[in-house]
Image (cartoon, grey):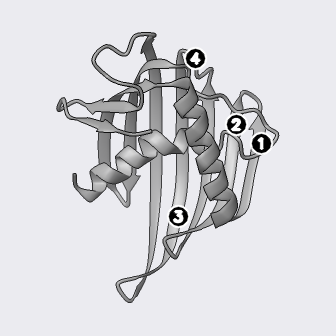
Amino acid sequence: MNWTAKVLLAAACFTLPSAVLASDTALPLRKAGKWEQKTVMDEGGKKHEQTLTICIDADMERSTALASDAEHKKSCSKYEVKKDGAAVIVTATCKMNGRDVESRTEMSGDFQAAFTVKIDSTTSGIQDSQSISVKRVIEQQGKYLGESCGDLQAGEAMGTDGKKVFVQ
């Protein structure tokens, strides 16, 4: 799996639950069952798209959210979750792999039938002895497909190429 595919997969699977338990603001978890999740990542004018069919298990979704919350509390100097009308906004300033990451995530939808997530982030720091700044915009749209996951096991995702990977 190439680097871009890994980034898209990570974004698709971990972005949403990452803020779920970050504060007193109640953020929804995806409903258990089969989801189609489309992710478009724009990284400096290069767009990458990925569509996954994911089998969400309620217990795994909660566990992933708890683990992600702990990681953000450890790695972020700022981590705020606020309601803005029908949307939930997460702002964070973190240190990931020795680099600074500033992000703003906007989540909307009921997370029972559909959701939309938009992440604007800037990663900066030293890479290969050079100061680098990378701006990313990741947009996700999820659509609930039903209670039965079919051939997918809980925590599994399948790309349009038919390859399955474990994501939770």
- Which tag, 3 or 2, sits closer to the chain's start? 2
- Which tag, 1 or 2, sits closer to the chain's start? 1
Q: Position of residue 162 (x, y in %)?
A: 18, 29
Frontmost of labels 4 and 3 is: 4
Taking the image as shown, residue 144 lies to the left or right of residue 26, namely left
Q: Position of residue 23 (x, y in %)?
A: 78, 45
Tell me, for residue 10, which label it has, or none: none
Tell me, for residue 82, which label it has, or none: 1
Q: Position of residue 124 (x, y in %)?
A: 51, 74
Q: Which residue is mark 4?
A: 112
Going 64% across and 57% down the picture, which residue do you hit? 72
Taking the image as shown, residue 101 lies to the left or right of residue 37, namely right
Q: Which residue is mark 2?
A: 88
> At numbered mark 3, what does the secondary structure look like: helix, strand or loop?
strand
> At numbered mark 1, what does the secondary structure look like: helix, strand or loop?
strand
Cα separation between marks 3 and 2:
20 Å
